[in-house]
Image (cartoon, rainbow, N blue to C red):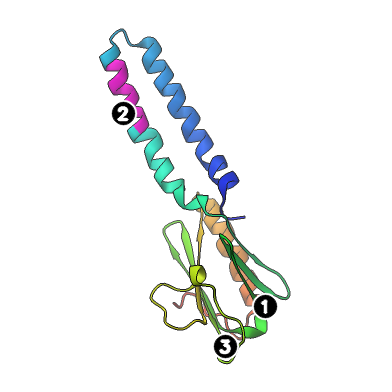
Amino acid sequence: MDGGPPVFRRKIRNPAIWTAVVIALCVLLSPDPTVAAMTSASAFVFGFLPSLVKSLPLLVRSSMSADAHGLRFRLGASTLDVPWGELSSISYVRQGRTLRLTVLLRPGTAIRVPAPLRRRGAQDSREAEYLLISWSQPELTSRTTRLHATLAANAVHAYHPGAV
């Protein structure tokens, strides 16, 4: 699973604990309440808030899976199942710690992409876009390697590495 409340809680737990420890130490060790309040506020703003902002996209329950039959995307209540033979084009691009996966279904397919999974600005209901957000570089590298191997093995006719 790439997102949802359990993933969000797991990713935000350590920054929350460290921020709470720093704030507790500031309150306990500072003789002046004003200094303690300012230091605690700074710890919150510079320690916890950036992690919170970075983790907010993880609140939306989402997942992507691939097997011998095809791809499955889920974003919130929307699901898209795409057999490998229905793909016209599939590619991904790394952007920071995000993989932007772009899918185009073949013409004449009966499968329609749900609105939340449609590529931004796309008029064609056959275009889908899915973002895999990784917390760390090693996680991103692992996902990229697995995704490349899966697409190279199963979507040979439609896989275009690095194209958007």
Q: Quadrant of the N terminus?
A: bottom right
Question: Residue 82's x, y, as percent?
Answer: 64, 77
Q: Residues within 10 Å of mark 3 (few under 14, many from 20)?
A: some
What amino acid type should be assigned to the residue bearing mark 2? Ser
Which residue is identified by label 2? 42
What amino acid type should be assigned to the residue bearing mark 1? Asn
Q: Looking at the image, is mark 3 or mark 1 earlier in the sequence?
A: 3
Q: What stretch is highlighted in magenta?
A: 35-44
Which residue is identified by label 1? 154
Which residue appears at 51% of the width and 34% of the height?
Answer: 14
Above/below status of 154 relative to 64:
below
Question: Residue 154's x, y, as percent?
Answer: 67, 78
Which residue is identified by label 3? 106
Q: Residues within 10 Å of mark 1 (few under 14, many from 20)?
A: some
- Front residue of this view, candidates 147 and 53: 53
Question: Residue 28's x, y, as percent?
Answer: 40, 11
- The quadrant holding residue 112 is bottom right
Question: Residue 5's x, y, as percent?
Answer: 56, 46
Element under disc 1: helix
Q: Looking at the image, is mark 3 or mark 2 earlier in the sequence?
A: 2
Element under disc 2: helix
